[in-house]
Amino acid sequence: MKIAIGADHAGYRLKDVIIPYIEALGHEVTDLGCNCEDSVDYPDYALSVCEKVLSGEADKGILICGTGIGMTIAANKVPGIRCALVHDLFSAKATREHNDSNVLAMGERVIGPGVAQEIVKIWIETEFSQGVRHQNRVNKVKDLEDRYTLHP
């Protein structure tokens, strides 16, 4: 599986821990930055990751900032992205099974590297349930997105 990953200045250290872990699980990672403590704008990195997912260059995306909140908000403005903010193992599994999330967000200031690695493993390995109940709900989310997205 191909995973695009991006972080801002408050999340790059956790990103640098997560990348080799994902690779050790046998997946390909595209690192879209950032790689320093210099203040950067999280929406730029959220967009870069989301564009890779939407284009098919990545199967899934991971975003990391201080809390994960900003990245989640920015990512969910991109039509076609279902980004979930996750800081526990149950939510990592549920968001894949029930919501078919294609982008994961985490906060470096909220969780440690060990929990983050477990979240990533569960999130990557869990499949969407695809039952009628869950698919109908995902379709309704897509309908909302279509309804409120400006079309040229």
Image: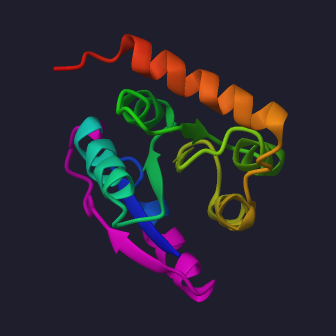
89 sits to left or right of 63: right
Q: Position of residue 6 (x, y in %)?
A: 36, 56
Q: Is residue 52 above or below residue 146?
A: below
Q: Position of residue 120 (x, y in %)?
A: 64, 62
- Residue at 42%, 52% in the rendered image: 11
Q: Point out the stretch of residues depicted in magenta.
A: 16-42
Q: Position of residue 106 (x, y in %)?
A: 56, 46
Camera-side residue of 4 and 80: 80
- Residue at 45%, 39% in the rendered image: 81
Report if residue 39 lies within the magenta region: yes
Residue 13, quarter of picture = bottom left
71 sits to left or right of 113: left
Q: Check the picture and name the quadrant holding the C terminus.
A: top left
- Residue at 21%, 43% in the rendered image: 39
Residue 118, quarter of picture = bottom right
Q: Check the image and name the residue furthest to the top.
A: 148
Q: Is residue 134 above or below residue 32?
A: above
Camera-side residue of 39 and 49: 49
10 sits to left or right of 93: left
Camera-side residue of 34 and 109: 34
Q: Position of residue 126 (x, y in %)?
A: 75, 61
Q: Is residue 114 above or below residue 63?
A: below
Report if residue 18 lies within the magenta region: yes
- Residue at 28%, 48% in the rendered image: 45
Which colour scheme appears in the figure?
A: rainbow
Count of numbered labels shown in the rendering: 0
126 sits to left or right of 43: right
